[in-house]
C-alpha cells in the first residue's frame, strides 16, 4: 500500500496539507498533490491532464469550493456548479483510467435540515438540507450517488466519507469565507489587540455544532483509504455537540479577550443542530477522534497568533 501512487486533489489546502503530511509520516512514498493553479478541476481537460501526469493508483478528492453561512448565501450558484463539476469529472475519469480506488470527501451539509441527532448515515435522504447550505451539500452528495452507481455498473471502487466541521492550525481565517471557529478566533484576537469592547456574532448562538480537529480528520481519511471498500457512506467526526454560544464563550476565555459578545439575530443560525453518529467509522476502520476540544482550540489560536495574523487577505 505504501508504494501506491496516491494523488490528493486540494493537497495544498487546509485539510490537504495535514493529510499529505500524515501519509508521509506513515512512510507512504508516492504522494502527489493536484491543486490550483496547476489544475483547474472544473475543466475537463485539466482533469484528464491530472490523470495523465500524476498516473495515480488511488485518488483522494478533497478539492472543493467552500465557505461559511455568509459566503454560501452570496454564492449558491458557484458552490453548486464548481463542486458538482469537480466531483463528477474526477470520478468519471478515474473510472475511465482504471484506478484502484477513489476516496470522495462529502460534507455534513448534505444531511437534511432536521435530522435526528446524532446523524446516522441512513438518514441522508430523509429530507432537504438546510437552505443556506443546500447547493453545496447537494453537489457534494452527488458524488455518493455517482460512486454507488459506478460501483454497481462498472465495479469501480469509490468510497464516500462525511466529515463534520473541521478546525485547526492552517484554517481559513479570511472573514469573507471562513467558518465559525476561525471567524470567532480572528474577531476575538483582533478585538483584544485593538482594545474593542464588543464583538458581534451572527445569529442567536442557540444552534449546535460538532467540530473535528484537522489532524484527526486526516487520520480518519488515511484509515479509510487503507481499510474501507464498501458502497455505504461513512461519517467521520469527533462525536460531541456544543452550542455556538458556548463556543463563543470558550474562545473568549482561551483568547483572553476582555470584552463581550453581541449577538445579531437578523442573520441566520444555519442548521439547528449538528452531531454525527460515528459508530460505523469505529466498526469499519477503527477510527475514534483523539484530540481534546479545548486543546485543539488552543493550538488553533496559537497558530493564528503566530502565523495566521501575518497573512494578508486582499
Image (cartoon, rainbow, N blue to C red):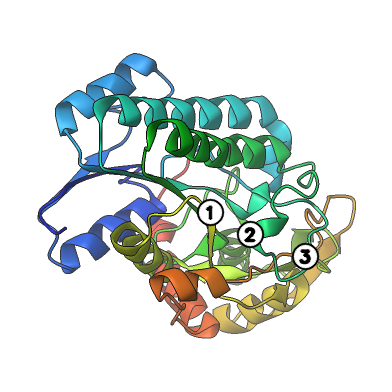
Residue 40 in the image, given as x and y percentages of width and height: 36, 25
Quadrant the N terminus occupies: bottom left
Tell me the residue at 37%/48% (across/down): 13
Q: Residue furthest top?
A: 45
The tag on residue 232 is 1
Q: Identify the element where label 3 is drawn.
A: loop
The answer, for residue 314, to whether it is visible in the render is: no
Task: Tell whether label 2 touches label 1 (CB within 8 Å).
Answer: yes
Of callouts 2 and 3, which one flags the residue occurring earlier in the amino acid sequence? 2
Mark whose residue sits in front, 1 or 2: 1
Residue 126 in the image, given as x and y percentages of width and height: 78, 50
Q: Nearer the viewer, residue 171 or 193?
A: 171
Distance of label 1 from label 3 (alpha carbons): 23 Å
Q: Identify the element where label 2 is drawn.
A: helix
Residue 99's place in the image compared with 11, above or below, is: above
Residue 170 in the image, given as x and y percentages of width and height: 39, 59
Of callouts 1 and 2, which one flags the residue occurring earlier in the amino acid sequence? 2
In the image, 192: left or right of 46? right
Q: Which residue is mark 3?
A: 273
Tell me the residue at 40%/70% (across/down): 285
Residue 231 in the image, given as x and y percentages of width and height: 48, 50
Task: Tell whether label 3 touches label 2 (CB within 8 Å).
Answer: no
The quarter of the displayed image where residue 54 is located: top left
Q: Nearer the viewer, residue 227 or 174?
A: 227
Distance of label 1 from label 2 (alpha carbons): 8 Å
The quarter of the displayed image where residue 260 is located: bottom right
Q: Residue furthest right?
A: 266
Q: Nearer the viewer, residue 260 or 29?
A: 29
How would you rate the neighbour count of disc 2 (Cα within 10 Å): few for under 14, some for 14-19, many for 20 or more? some
Residue 86's place in the image compared with 62, above or below, is: above
Amino acid at each position: 500500500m505504501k508504494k501506491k501512487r496516491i494523488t490528493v486533489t486540494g493537497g495544498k489546502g487546509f485539510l490537504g496539507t495535514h493529510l499529505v503530511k500524515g501519509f508521509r509520516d506513515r512512510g507512504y512514498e508516492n504522494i502527489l498533490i493536484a491543486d490550483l493553479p496547476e489544475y483547474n478541476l472544473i475543466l475537463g481537460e485539466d482533469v484528464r491532464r491530472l490523470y495523465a501526469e500524476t498516473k495515480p493508483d488511488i485518488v483522494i478528492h478533497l478539492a472543493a469550493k467552500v465557505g461559511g453561512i455568509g459566503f454560501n448565501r452570496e454564492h449558491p450558484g458557484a458552490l453548486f456548479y464548481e463542486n458538482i463539476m469537480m466531483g463528477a469529472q474526477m470520478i468519471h475519469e478515474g473510472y475511465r483510467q482504471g484506478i484502484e480506488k477513489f476516496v470522495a470527501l462529502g460534507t455534513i451539509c448534505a444531511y437534511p435540515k432536521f435530522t435526528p441527532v446524532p446523524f446516522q448515515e441512513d438518514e441522508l435522504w430523509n429530507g432537504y438540507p438546510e437552505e443556506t447550505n443546500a447547493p453545496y451539500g447537494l453537489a457534494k452528495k452527488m458524488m455518493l450517488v455517482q460512486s454507488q452507481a459506478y460501483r454497481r455498473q462498472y465495479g469501480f471502487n469509490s468510497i464516500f466519507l462525511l466529515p463534520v466541521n473541521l478546525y485547526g492550525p492552517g484554517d481559513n481565517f479570511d472573514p469573507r469565507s471562513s467558518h465559525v471557529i476561525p471567524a470567532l478566533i480572528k474577531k476575538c484576537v483582533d478585538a483584544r489587540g485593538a482594545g474593542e469592547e464588543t464583538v458581534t456574532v451572527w445569529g442567536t448562538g442557540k444552534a449546535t455544532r460538532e467540530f473535528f480537529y484537522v489532524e484527526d480528520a486526516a487520520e480518519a481519511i488515511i484509515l479509510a483509504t487503507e481499510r474501507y471498500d464498501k458502497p455505504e457512506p461513512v461519517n467521520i467526526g469527533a462525536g460531541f455537540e456544543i452550542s455556538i454560544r458556548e463556543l463563543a464563550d470558550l474562545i473568549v476565555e482561551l483568547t483572553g479577550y476582555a470584552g463581550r459578545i453581541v449577538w445579531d439575530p437578523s442573520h441566520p443560525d444555519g442548521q439547528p443542530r449538528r452531531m454525527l453518529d460515528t459508530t460505523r467509522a469505529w466498526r469499519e476502520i477503527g477510527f475514534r477522534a483523539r484530540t481534546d476540544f479545548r486543546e485543539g482550540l488552543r493550538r488553533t489560536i496559537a497558530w493564528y497568533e503566530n502565523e495566521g495574523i501575518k497573512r494578508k487577505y486582499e
